[in-house]
Image (spheres, helix red, strand yellow):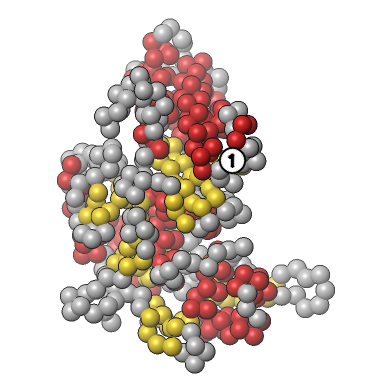
Amino acid sequence: MNRPLFLSVHPLTKSFEVRYNDDNDQVGLQKKKVNEMGEYVMQWDSLQLSEGALDAFSYVLRNNPATKADICRCMGKGISTVNRYMTELCEKGLVLESGVADSSGGRKPVLYSINSQSYLICCVNISTIYCEVAVADMALHVLKIDSISIGAKDTPDEIIARIGQAYRNQLAFLGADENRFLGMGVSVFGAIKNEQGVLYKPIIQYMNEQWDGYPILQRLQEEIPLTLYAEKGINAAAMLEYNHGKARDSSNIIYVLCAMNIRSAVIQNGHITGNSPFFEDAFGHMVINYDGPLCQCGQYGCLNCYAAIPAVLEGFSKEVKRGHSTMIGGDVDHVTIQQVCAAARANDIPAVNAITDKAHMLGIALANYINIICPDKVILAGLMVKESELYYDTAVKTARARLGFTGNQDVTFQRLGSFSNSLTVGAGAMLLEKLIHGRPPVQHS
């Protein structure tokens, strides 16, 4: 069986593309024939499912578990049609009956859940200083995950080899057959030039300059021969929360990741919009003080200079050097963000001042963002938010104070998402979505 090469989304239009093999034969998702019900049947490895069954599967995936009545309402189909779809999915082993739901009268409706034992997904996130490799089931539960550090001397080829070894070790640990894998979802810091499948140079460079222009898709697939789909990390994390996490009840969201830099994604009515096609950290390079410090990007006064982890650490060091005493011992120029956040929770003055000052600047930038985008929900995630509730609360309070004149007071804020490894799991979720549809998915209600 010929495996698909890789699936990609154009960075500007988000249009789905199907790649070809050396014999110019179309591979991957392709429309095969029309079944007797008049629906196109799409090839999904060895499975052949009608588009209606794929839409039903997509609904169960996002609303796990679900009843037939739920699916009927979402798809606008009658019960006999949905019965046919669910029979198809159950026979293929993709969903199973998992219980019954409450009923106001009469027979209790059957609940259908994703069969997590059927297929597996390889998930990879490549960031600037680390990467993660995970195996997840169809319900996006992580079965095994490993982290690999990326140093300045580590070449891309060396990191890809370590990713491949981690994947093979995970297969051995889980006793999993590679034939159970649907493919590999990959998220990257920056973007990928789709035509060549190479990394586009991000605003803040990877530690090793060889990553710029590196043929990452080709090398990954040489190392792990699976169907491959790649996406910007922040987009993958945002879509994960939108479809499967804490933003499922929202139409329009802003997702902000606060860590070594500030990254963001905007989703409006199920579509990723409003962010740079090449730079996922563009929000972090919004100038909020034209006379501010020099940023790595070459501009002055970027948000990253005020609100990212390096800025918090620098602020803490300055507070101590001004004469404020701190409970943290040792060289104040070599403390960790975990130490600073822990000290702030103990009311350490330099730590509290550093965090509140930087979070205040994030709040100002967030208010500008919200006033333009008008989201239903804003999710703040990342290491900085995870380690410091003070950082989150200060940013939200500052932002809310600046929303009054635009009528955006009803926006809700969420601290952290539903997934602890959102960049990694999100890559797998994006792959699954593309394998199911290869087109805009049915919107959940």
Q: Residue at x 53, y 84 (%)?
A: 88
User: Which of these two is toward me, 54 or 287?
Assistant: 287
Residue 423 in sight:
no
Q: Is residue 333 above or below residue 41?
A: above
Q: Position of residue 288 (x, y in %)?
A: 41, 27
- Image x and y of residue 212, in percent: 20, 46
* Residue 23 falls in image quadrant: bottom left
Q: Give the residue type at disc 1.
A: Phe
Q: Position of residue 27 (x, y in %)?
A: 29, 76
SS class of the residue under badge 1? strand
Q: Nearer the viewer, residue 326 or 384?
A: 384
> From where the camera sits, is residue 354 visible?
yes
Q: Residue 279: horizontal and vertical position, in percent? A: 33, 44
Q: Residue furthest right?
A: 105
Q: Which residue is mark 1?
A: 413
* Camera-side residue of 244 and 21: 21
Q: Is residue 6 left or right of residue 342?
A: left
Question: Which is more toward the observer, 115 or 433?
Answer: 433
> Could you tell me which residue is drawn at 62 percent across and 63 percent down?
445
Q: Is residue 395 left or right of residue 212?
A: right
Q: What residue occupies the far top of the structure in this picture?
A: 323
**Quadrant of the rendering where the N terminus is positioned:** bottom left
**Which residue is located at x 36 percent, y 34 percent?**
285
> In the displayed image of the protein, which residue is found farthest to the front?
405
- The image shows residue 143, relative to residue 89, as above or below, that is above
